[in-house]
Amino acid sequence: MTGVGERLERQNAAGDPWTGVNTDALARATREQSERAVRGVADMETYLAAQVSDTSHREVVGPLLDGGAPSGVALRRGAVIASWGDPARVEMAFSATKSVLALTAGPAYDDGLLRLDEPVHRSVDLPQFADSYGRAITWRHLLDQTSRWEGELWSKPTSVDAQSTREGTESPGGAPGEGWAYNDVRVNLAALALTVLLGGAHWGGGLWINALDLARIGQLCLRGGSWEGRRVVSRRWIEELWTPCRVKPNYGLSWWLNDDRTVWPDDPSTGRCARGNGGAHLLWVDPARDLVISSRWGARPEALLQAVSAAVTPNAGSAGG
């Protein structure tokens, strides 16, 4: 178990992690988060049933994992500066999985197998991309949720996802790229396409991961795709992940961007995040503070981000948000 003060990246130290950190404020922020539990997660089946508004497709495809108490870690300059709950406990990542999925497309991008603005059908053979509409869908459309694809995948139609109408910018008709919608069925299509592209044999049931490992993913992104001095994915791909979508500026390639403070209004504009289940699962990356926060099953995550960010001074020369 990694403890407070221990470096996750031992060969890529970036200075004293405690410089500019108000340790009392940090301890208070994480203690309060540990006390803000999301209720009902110990029985995941019941918890999800209460959340899903659609009544026609309520059955869950794949296994479920009951949730635990709030947990998480905060990293500064690659070292653990705070830990609460049991950050080694594996949890379902919910929609934070989307951001990790986009990250995994990086090696294909780096190897030239995936070109963001090239139609998907040119590199994978799937019936979803065979008709005239599907042939216009690019990898960028899949990864920034602007494909506007309509259909059914693994018994779930795209129309079943109520999230699409909550904050989407779609209107009836139109070509791929002309509207944005947060649609899990379309994300599953992106996952299927990547599976075919990379030679996989079957699809999975989301991401199960502990808070510490999720923080490692954030640290990889913060370091521009390098880990312990070794290049895992290109810096260019990390930049693509965090480039605003043309029709949804606070969204990149499946990452939320707080540049205009519309994702978390009271939190730094320099933050990027993967979030799931309303933020109950959160990976926050703030390059301006060399800060990564991974939080699981804690309510009011925006309060955690605000308090921890206030306890960490931005790097010299950084806007800081």
Image (cartoon, rainbow, N blue to C red):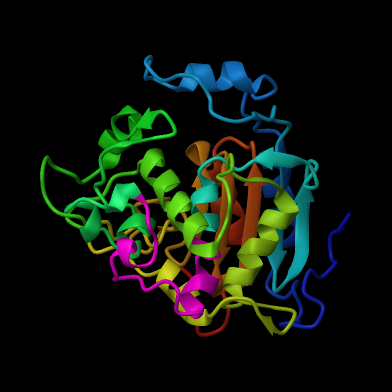
Query: Viewed as shown, does residue 276 lie left or right of 36?
Result: left
Quadrant of the frame with the N terminus: bottom right
For the point 41% across and 28% down, the residue is: 155
Residue 55 % position (x, y)? 38, 14
Quadrant of the frame with the C terminus: bottom left
Query: Viewed as shown, does residue 2 lie left or right of 104?
Result: right
Query: Viewed as shown, does residue 178 lie left or right of 76?
Result: left
Quarter-of-image position of residue 173: top left
Q: Return the residue nearer the eye: 215 or 174.
A: 174
- 11 in relation to 154, above or below: below
- 162 in relation to 245, above or below: above
- 228 in relation to 209, above or below: below
Q: Return the residue nearer the eye: 44 or 312.
A: 44
Quarter-of-image position of residue 53: top left
Q: Return the residue nearer the eye: 11 or 25.
A: 11
* Whether residue 280 can be seen here: yes
Quarter-of-image position of residue 186: top left
Q: Which residues are magenta?
A: 102-126
Residue 170 % position (x, y)? 18, 44
Q: Looking at the image, how many numbered discs can be counted on the residues?
A: 0
77 in magenta: no
For the point 80% across and 42% down, the residue is: 86
113 in magenta: yes
For the point 66% across and 30% down, the residue is: 37
* Whether residue 312 can be seen here: no
Residue 94 % position (x, y)? 55, 40
Residue 152 % position (x, y)? 34, 34
